[in-house]
Amino acid sequence: MANFNLEAEAIHIFREVAAEAENPVFLYSVGKDSAVMLHLARKAFYPGKPPFKFLHVDTKWKFKEMIAFRDKMMADLGFELLVHTNPDGIKRGINPFDHGSAMHTDIMKTVALKQALDHHQFDIAFGGARRDEEKSRAKERIFSFRTAEHRWDPKNQRPEIWSLYNTRKKPDETIRVFPLSNWTELDIWQYILSENIPIPDLYLAKKRPVVERDGTLIMVDDERMPIKDKSEIKHEMVRFRTLGCYPLTGAVRSNATTLPEIVQEMLLSTTSERQGRVIDSDAGASMEQKKQEGYF
Amino acid sequence: MSEKDLISSDINAYIANQAAKDTLRFITCGSVDDGKSTLIGRLLYESKMIFDDQLSALQKDSSKFGTQGDEIDFALLVDGLAAEREQGITIDVAYRFFTTDKRKFIVADTPGHQQYTRNMATGASTASLAIVMIDARKGILEQTRRHAFISSLLGIKQIVLAVNKLDLVDYSEEVFNQISADFYVIQKEHLKFDHVQAIPLSALKGDNIIKLSKNTPWYQGPTLIDWLESVENAKMGKGLLRLPIQYVLRPNLDYRGYAGRIVSGVVAPDNRVKILPSGVETVIEEITSMDGVLDNAEEGASVAVTLKDEVDASRGDMIVEAGAPAELSDQFRVNIIWMHEQEMIPGRSYILKIEGGTANVTIAKPRYKINVNNYERLPADVLELNDIGSCNISLDRNIVFDPYEENRTTGSFILIDRESNSTVGAGLIRYALRRASNIHWQALEINKTARSEAKSQTPCVLWFTGLSGSGKSTIANIVEKKLHANLRHTMLLDGDNVRHGLNRDLGFTDQDRVENIRRVTEVSKLMVEAGLITLVSFISPFASERDSARQAMGEGEFIEIFVKTSLAEAERRDVKGLYVKARSGQLKNFTGIDSPYEEPRTPEIIVDTEKYSAKECAEQIISYLVDNGYS
C-alpha cells in the first residue's frame, strides 16, 4: 500500500489541473515515468477519458522501438497524440553527431517544446520529472511556473503549502506540472510491476548491436550512426535505464530480462540513474541552467 | 536477515516488503550552520541512497566548496542550487527521499534563514514530524523558538529536538539536559506538541543516528532512526468523512461521478451522507475505479463516487458524514502567515483558495501579530513577509470548513493576489464568526430592476481612473451634464468631495487608499441598486481595488474608463499645485511621484487627454454608452 498515497496524490493533481486549466496537455515521452503517468491519468478520469491532449516532442532521433510503442499505446487507448518536430531544426539538419548533444537537445527538444506549447496555446503541461532524479529537481515545485519566455526562475517560485495549488497566471505564462514529484525510481518500478503497466522492451536486457563511444555503449538503431568499420559493432546483452535520443542514451551491460531483475540490478548498482544520459555530464549546475532555459 | 540481503537473495520478497511500507513525511529546521543539511546527507548516506558516481562528485565538490577540509561534506549532497553553493546556505524547500527496513521517508529540508520562514511553513504543512536542530554550543536560539512555533501552529504533533554538534562540547550530559529542560518550559507554556523527543547527536560524526553512541553512555533513549521508524504517522483530520468535490466526471449521460481526495474518514456504499452547502442528504451508491468497484475507501484515497439520488453538486461542494457535517460560514477568525514581499493590505480583496474552490475575501486590520521569537502579541496595521497574525476575514460566499485544529485540510487556505497572481499568504481557520448568520438580508419587494424600469434606464457605474490632474472630474462632469440633458438619472461621486465627508478619516497610505475605494465601491453599489447611472471619479491607483469594484457589480454594470495622461503632462498642468508640493516633499504618498499608479490593462474605454479635449473625450464616452445600450 506504500504507493497508495503517491497514486492518490498524483490523481489529485491531475484532477486539479483538469478543473482549473483552460488548455492542458500531457507531455508523453514514451519512457517508464511517462507510462506510469499515463496510467494515473487514466485512473483519475475513469470511466471517462482524460480531458486533455497528448503531445510528443519527436527529435527524429528516438529509438525506433519507442515510436512503435508510442503509436501502439495511443491507438490501443484511443487517445489523440500530437507529434511535434522543430521544422527549423530539420531544415538545418541538426543532429547529435555533427552538432553535439547540447545543441541538438536545445534545438530539437527545448526549442521544439516551446514551439509546440506556443502554437497550441497550452497553458499547463504535465511532465514526468521526479524530485529524486537530480539535486536541482529536489527543490522543484509540483506546479512550476514559467515566464512568457518559458524560463524557470528558481528564486521566484510560489510557495506550495498543504496541497493547495495556485494555478492563476497571466495569459502568456505557462505552468509545468509534475504529478510524480514525490516518487522515487524504486516506487516507479514497483508500481509498474504491481499495476502491470506496459513499457518499451528497451528497458529489458537483450542482445543489441552496440558501439563504444567515449566509454559509453551506444546502440546502432539505424544507418545514421557513423560507423568507421563494421567490426566496431558488437552484439551484447544490454538494456537502457532511461530512454531518449538513441545516440545520446548509454546502454548498460545487463542480463536482467524481467522487471524484478531490473529492480535487483538497480538496487545493487553503484551508479545513479541519470548517468547514462550524455547531457548531464557537464559542470555541477548544468541541469539547473538547462531548466532555466526551458528544458523540461 | 536484513532487508538489504533480500535484494540479492529474493528480490520479489524485497519488492513486496517495499509495497507494504508506509511513508513518514518530516521536516528538518534550525538555524544557519546547525547542521541540517549535514544530517540529511548523513541519513541518505547511511541508508545507502548515495551512488558511487554521486559520492565521487561529492568528494570532488567537498574540496572545492566544502567546509570540512578534506572530509566529505554531506551538506553539499543536499544543497542543490548554484546560488546556494556560492552563498553557502540553503534558500528553499528541498524534498529528499530515503528508505529504511521499516519505513519510507520524505524529508522537507527547510531553511533556517530568517527571511525564508515562509518555506519552513510550507515544509511543515504536510509533515507529521519536525526535527528541530540545535547547536549544542549555542542552546535554544530565537530561530529554535520560531521553528518550534511554526511547526506547532501548522499542526505537527511530534517533535524531535536534535541536540547536534555534541562532539564540540565533549559529549556533555549537562549541556544536553539543560537544553532539553529549557525546551520543555517553552513547550509547556506555548506549544501544542503531543510529544517532545530530545536526542543527543553529532550528524558529522554519526553519533546516535543509527546506533547508540559510545560517546554518550549516559543516553539510553532511541536513536534518531529508531525514533523515525516507530513514531506514529499523523492523520490529517479527525475520523469524520470529509470528501471535497474536486471534479465532476460526466463521460456519458448515464454516469455522474463525484471525484475528490478523501480528506478524513471512510466512504462506503450505502453510507448516508450530506452534500454541503446545500444540505441535501443522500446515500453513496458506488465507488468507481479502473480496478473495479471498491468496497470502501479511506483517508488519503483519491476516489470517484456516485450518489443514489440526483443531487445538484459541483466542484467546491463537500460530501460529509450525514450525522457530523462540517460547518458553513463566510466570516472567520484566522491565523495568517504572510508570504510575500508586498505587505498585506486590510480591506483589499484577495482570492482565497481552499480545497476544491475559491472565494473573494477581504481581511480586516490584524488584531495582533505574534513575535515568534518570544511569543508576544504585538499591535499591527499590516502583515509583512514572514509575519504571523490573527485576523478576521470576510468572504463573498459561504464555504464548507472545519477548524484547522480538527482538520488540516478542510481548515486551511491560501491567499492569492489578484494583480500578480502570487500566493501571498497561508491561512488557518480557527473558528467562524457568527455575524454572517445574525445579519440577515432584508428581502426588499422593490428591487433594482423595478427602480431602473421606473427611470427607463440601465443602471451602471462609470469608473474614471487616472493620475491626479488627468482631467477625470472635468470629463465626468461633462458626461453627467449630457446624460442629465438626456433625462437620465445620475449621481457623481468625486474623490475630493467624498474625502470631505464619508472618508474624512482616511489619509493617503496604501491601506487608507484601499479602504477609500472599498467604501466608494459599496456606495456606488447602492447607487446602482437605486437604478442610477453612477459616475465615480477617483484616482483609484491600484488594479486590485478596481478589479474588486468590478466584481462587486453585476454583469455589464461596471465600465472602467482610463483617463490617459502621461505623468509629465499631468505635472505640467498641475491644476491644484499638488505636484510641486509632492516634488518638494511637502506632500507624501502622492500618486505618480512616491506612490504607484497601476494602469488598467483592459478598460472598457480609454480617453487620451493629450490628443483630445475634455469635451471630445466626454463625447467618446457618450457614444460608447449609446452603442452599448446604456443611454
Image: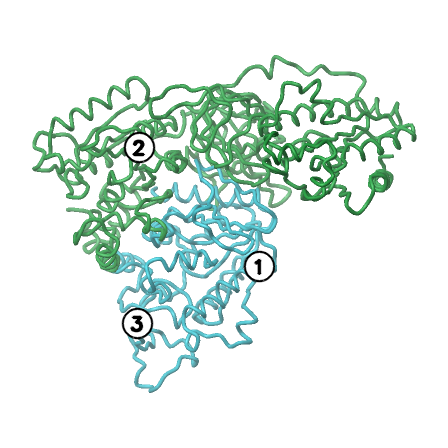
Chain colours: A cyan, B green
- Viewed as shown, does residue B306 lie left or right of B150? right
Residue B587 % position (x, y): 61, 30
> Which residue is tagged 2?
B129
Q: Amino acid at mark 2?
A: Leu
Mark closer to the observer (3, 1): 3
Q: Amino acid at mark 3?
A: Thr
> Which residue is tagged 1?
A80
Using the image, name the chain to which the residue with label 2 belongs. Answer: B
Question: From where the camera sits, is residue B265 visible?
Answer: no
Question: From where the camera sits, is residue B191 visible?
Answer: yes
Kind of element beneath mark 2: strand
Using the numbered discs, state the Cα–Cα distance from disc 3 to disc 2 in whole angstroms. 44 Å
> Which residue is tagged 3?
A216
Which residue is drawn at the image coordinates 24% and 47% (left, top)?
B41
Kind of element beneath mark 3: strand
Which residue is drawn at the image coordinates 24% and 49% (left, top)?
B13
Q: Are marks 3 and 1 in contact (CB under 8 Å)?
A: no
Q: Are marks 3 and 2 in contact (CB under 8 Å)?
A: no
Query: First in sequence: mark 3 or mark 1?
Result: 1
- Viewed as shown, does residue B464 lie left or right of A177? right
Q: Nearer the viewer, residue B509 or B232?
A: B509
Q: Nearer the viewer, residue B285 or B544?
A: B544
Residue A28 % position (x, y): 49, 58
In the image, farthest residue toward the bottom: A229
Mark closer to the observer (1, 2): 2
